[in-house]
Image (cartoon, grey):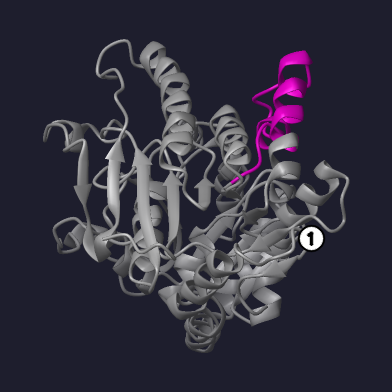
Amino acid sequence: MVSENSVQILLAHRYFWPDSAPYGLLLRQIATLLSQQENFQVTVFTGQPAYSKAVVAQGPRPRTETIDGGATVMRARLFSEQRFRSLFRNLNAILFSLQLAARILVQRPKVVMCSTQPPIFGAALAQFAAGIIRAKFIYHLQDIHPEVAWVGGQLRKSFVPRLLRWVDARTCRKADHVVVLSTDMAESIRKRTENPNSPVHVIQNYNLPDYSERLDVPEGFKKKPGIFRLLFAGNVGHFQNLDKLVAATSLVGEEHEFELVIMGDGKAKPELQKQVANNNNKRVVFLPYQPLSIAEPLMSEADLCVVSLLPDVYRYAFPSKLITYMSQGCPVLVLAESESELGRFPERYKIGYSCSQESVDQIARTIEFAIASASDRAEFSERSQQAWQDFFGREQIDAAWVNLIQSCDTTSANQVSSGAKR
């Protein structure tokens, strides 16, 4: 029974558990946490599984169900995306956004939180509906659109992208709270809104939970004795700028025995495989996407785990894989601008190395230095896991989310905070 004094919270995202979309899994953790708090009533508004073909094959979920902790999951009526996927995915984005706005107006929650899926217009409609009923609106940004597509070369700064930026900037200005993943993203939001006092909060993501069956690591995937292993794990896309890293492996001296393992799938993977084949580069190994039960042990045994981004992307996105690496005690190699929060991570926490992502020769020299300093791995590993526990562990993230929601009844709209101690 809903108490008269309870805080009704509506969390919205197009994809949700049991789909394998990362934010959908993250949102389940947030929903479970909040629903376990006294006087919080949590509803997740989402769609039927469509992200993972394996999950879609299991059939539709109930329109309404209760998950662990007591959160209620409500699913919008959308078209199947198994045929004409691009057409129906775009149509479903519109339908989901409209049904989300309607749900807000009917349910009248006190707090509404929306992410970036559907992008831009989903959050805009949710904020508009929340404003009508005077609910607090939280905009949870995993990346900042369309700017991240601009710097990634996927969009020109033409009329339509500029209009999209205006719409999303308006949503940020109207939001009671904006949650991002880094101080650089927070600064981009402040510039966007032209308000240095924008209510921006930095809260890192949880490590993704693994709801799948536990699997053993195949013998062929394990690190061979005497070989220095660099590991990249995650989406193999253009934003990751991995062609420079792959090129650098050919410049490392032949006296160094090492390999670069790229584990994951993405649009840039075929190009990277072609680059490796054309150069007859035996030092680069590709593995397909792996569930966490396999990926995490491979991270733990790697000598160095890699994070890489295109120039300027750090202003609009932050790779959460860095925090996942730290949770596994991984020393890291960050390829990013030295002035970015991302680029400063290895030095700040004494957990590895960083260098510019634009110089192939500098990347090669940094790899050589890391190999020569392999005896430092144990100290890096210990500090990496300790820093994760101290600053980015579940306890810190739980507290940040609970405090943010609790403040929604009383907070002034001009408070800037950070969700985890830096």
| Foreground of the two, 71 or 388 | 71
Compared with 172, 297 (above or below) is below
Q: Residue at x 67, y 37 (%)?
A: 148
Q: Position of residue 275 (x, y in %)?
A: 51, 33
Residue 152 appears left or right of 304: right
- SS at circle 1: loop
Residue 169 appears left or right of 305: right
Q: Is residue 304 visible?
A: no
Q: Position of residue 225 (x, y in %)?
A: 31, 74
Query: Amino acid type of disc 1?
Result: Asn
Residue 410 appears left or right of 51: right
Q: Position of residue 292 (x, y in %)?
A: 29, 60
Q: Residue at x 47, y 82 (%)?
A: 385
Kindly indicate the quadrant of the structure image that contains residue 327. bottom left
**Residues in magenta, as a range:** 143-169
| Foreground of the two, 68 or 72 | 72
Q: Residue at x 42, y 64 (%)?
A: 6
Compared with 318, 194 (above or below) is above
* Quarter of the rendering occupied by the C terminus: bottom right
Whether the magenta-drawn stretch holds residue 414 is answered as no
- For label 1, count other residues whose C-alpha is less than 10 Å away and answer few (under 14), some (14-19) or many (20+): some
Q: Quickly name the residue at label 1.
A: 414
